[in-house]
Amino acid sequence: MRDLRWRGNRRATYVVVFFALSMSILCLKAFSASKSVVKDSKDAELEVGALSESQDTPIFAVGSIRELFRDYSDDLSRLSVAYDLIGTADEGQLIDLFDQTVKRRYTKEDGSWKSELISLISAQLAPLNLEKAVSLYEAQPLEDVKYMLYGITHAWASKDFDGAVEFARKQDESIYPVALRGIVDASLSLPEATLMDLGTEFGDLAYVERAVRAYKLKVDLADPDEAWTRLINDPTSHLEENFFRIKHVANALIDEYGVSETDNLLSSIISPTLNFKLRQSILSKVALSDPETAFDYALATPNDVFGTMLTPVINTWASVDPESALNRVSLLEPSKIRDRLQQTVVSSWVQLDPTKFLDSVDNLPSDLRDMARMHLIGHLSKDSIEDAITVFADMSEATQQEQAALTIVDSWLDSNPDAAFHWIVSNSEIAGYRNRVLQSFLVKLTKKDADKAIDLALSRPISGETEIGLEAFVIDELKFSDTDRALRLLDRVRPGETQLAAFKSVSTGLIYDQRTGEAIELGKTLPEDEQVDYYDSMTFSISTQEPVKKILELLPNIPVTEARSELAENVLMFSSVRDEGPLSSEDVDSLMEYVSPANLPRVKLFLNR
């Protein structure tokens, strides 16, 4: 076997290896959750930072794996000490630590530490003595080697890309993603096409694309002036997929030169779509430090009749200083744009601190107070219905008050539906829209507890002969989702218009459930004076849901002559739009027998067109 040894400057190696160690941990954790291993390499940098910070805590050195487990029980301290132990070990010590790790007997609680430690040790050893690392790798079972592979392929590819690729190809396909990550992360300076081909071969092109994109951005941000010149002079860069790079380079230039650079940057972008998105991005960024200037820039955007550029500025400004943002927006000429932006600011303001905002409501312009209270109720009702109702009592604008009432009831429904129902039926302030709130409440309660919804609906009296009881809304909500339950609940429905409405709802559910025969039989239990309306209501549904042969079987069972005629007419006159195709002459003759004499001339004229 050819010499694979590689020794370099110890300090430089330690920095590289420290990064590799973190990446191997990521591979370990990702593999434990999934075989695909798709985390971004950027995550590793964040983990390195977190682990570096953890090392600020005083620790005591250990000299062996046994001491590591004996002296440290919590994961964070143990990992920090393991980093110190492995990171400062020489080649011989690393080999010894690896041997200790694989031979140790682990408790159930410590079982995951074996894979973590061998990944750390092999990643540290591979840059020092790749040949030895590979020999240790080849001596381990598959369930362990997957945690070593990243460090080995990363070290190998750093010196010999082709050799690393050949080695990776010999591994089990289930761990290809780990090998790919190690090779790609060590080879990002190679031609993009080479890395993309490798990603395709090893089955994780998406990871390569993310890694290459992050690398390009890193290079761009090292010299944003040069990167911007390169980007705008390359026509292929003016594409939607390159917006990520363009945006970040532009932001870096704004950081360096200030908001005055905005016009120069935007004038360089050819694509109208990218130009538009970049302006939004830049203004959002500027709004963090200089919202007034960002607002003025947005306001001066040509042809922005919908205030599209103002929206991201206000979104950012309102999250930092909503009071100033609202004052500035209120200076705009009255318009739908101003109204929308005011709502945006108020909504953000409420989210920052609902309790504190409560003290500020009366200081708002009078035309904004109810809108502000509506947003405030949305937050207060999650924790305190009483507080929400107190704010509700101060509202006067009907539309916003109704929306607030619905919000209160929705929150209350989960904790105390009886109290919510009592508030709806007894509160004089919602008299103008009480029925709409009641219906909304019962529909939502039905999805949670249909029996409770029926009980509450029945407790509400029916005030007149033509009024429909609320239980009909409960049954209508169930007609498709639970037709059998809706059918059973019909026994609890009050007679009259309410019963008829509920029966109609259930019949629709039965027909769409291919149970039309049951729907027809159900109607026969109604009083005769209600059957005409009931059967007339189902004729269109039957004509669109059932095949002609089935309809011909059902027609004799419908007890109402007018309904039989209407159903037959619907089938005859709309047969051209049915999936079955044209009616046969026999079907036409059979259907014509059910058409009422008064309508026969009209139907014949239609058929002879």
Image: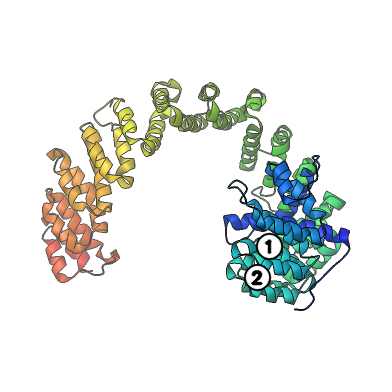
Residue receiving disc 1: 148
Residue 185: percent from left, percent from top: 73, 64
Residue 602: percent from left, percent from top: 18, 60
In the depicted structure, whether residue 244 falls above or below residue 349? below
- Asked if residue 591 can be seen in this view, the reply is yes
Front in this rendered view, residue 299 or 407: 407
Residue sitting at x 79%, y 73%: 4
Q: Decide if residue 298 is on the left or right side of residue 473.
A: right
In the depicted structure, whether residue 286 falls above or below residue 231? above
In the depicted structure, whether residue 591 falls above or below residue 73? below
Which corner quadrant holds the C terminus? bottom left
| Mark identifier at residue 199 | 2
Residue 348: percent from left, percent from top: 65, 36
Residue sitting at x 16%, y 66%: 588
Q: Residues within 10 Å of mark 2 (few under 14, many from 20)?
A: many
Which kind of residue does numbered mark 2 sit on? Gly
Image quadrant where residue 460 sits: top left
Q: Residues within 10 Å of mark 1 (few under 14, many from 20)?
A: many
Which of the marked residues, 1 or 2, is nearer the chain's N terminus?
1
- Asked if residue 239 can be seen in this view, the reply is no
Q: Decide if residue 87 is on the left or right side of residue 477.
A: right
Image colouring: rainbow
Which kind of residue does numbered mark 1 sit on? Met
Verify CB contact (< 8 Å) between mark 1 and mark 2: no
